[in-house]
Amino acid sequence: MSLIQIRKRLLAVETIHHEGGPPAATPLRMAAAIAVVHNPYAGRYEPDLLPFMAELRALGSALAQELVGVLGKDRVEAYGKAAIVGVNGELEHGAVWHEAGGWAMRAALGEPKAIVPAAKAVASAGYRLMVPLHYIHAAYVRSHFNAMEVGVQDGPRPDEIAFALVMADGGRIHERLGGLRKDQVAVHDGQR
């Protein structure tokens, strides 16, 4: 029997035209794909979480492909991931998403080098979490440091986990704080 039992999925797309300045020539689009799943380890300590992490790869792939379908593979420039664990779980139950969600996004986007930033929390249903984003090819591209809020109104329930992936098709609207530019990335180590 599969460890992954999905109760619901959510897709949210945010389009930002301006942040108080002039409207951007091309609005920024950020999208979040979320799955609320049963936590097979809720209410107990499980020493081996690796089977759960391995099974989550398929869910990660499905969510990543959904985001690529919305934004377009060649347009995605920033990404992040998150997990909200219901109160009968533990933070480590959300940490399984680091490998499963990050691996899936890199595979869907052609293996970019930068790590996928993450946030996680143990919380009650309706909790909202800010998911950090950065440039997919180099973590130090300041223009792409951003965040998107994710959450599900009725989840995660105490014995559930909400897993989220987020992608964006650009950096912040009106970014103007300098630093490494995406066209200056030269090292290709995922950092600079």
Image: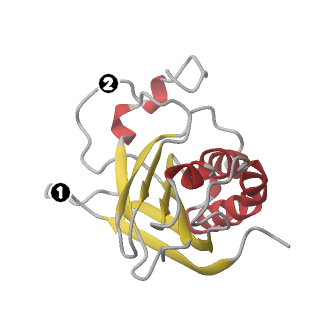
Give how far across and how far down residue 48 sits, in percent. Answer: 73, 48
In the drawing, what numbered circle is on residue 179? Answer: 2
Asked if residue 26 can be seen in this view, the reply is no
Secondary structure beneath label 2? loop
59 vs 12: above or below: above
The residue tagged 1 is: 22
| Image quadrant occupied by the N terminus | bottom right
- Asked which quadrant contains residue 2, the reply is bottom right
Q: Of discs 1 and 2, which sits in the foreground? A: 2
- Asked which quadrant contains residue 37, the reply is bottom right
Inspect the image, locate mark 2, and give the three-letter code of the amino acid beneath it. Gly
Q: Are marks 1 and 2 in contact (CB under 8 Å)?
A: no
Residue located at (55% from left, 73% from top) = 159
Asked if residue 113 can be seen in this view, the reply is yes
Residue located at (61% from left, 52% from top) = 97
- The extreme front residue here reads 44
Secondary structure beneath label 1? loop
Inspect the image, locate mark 1, and give the three-letter code of the amino acid beneath it. Pro
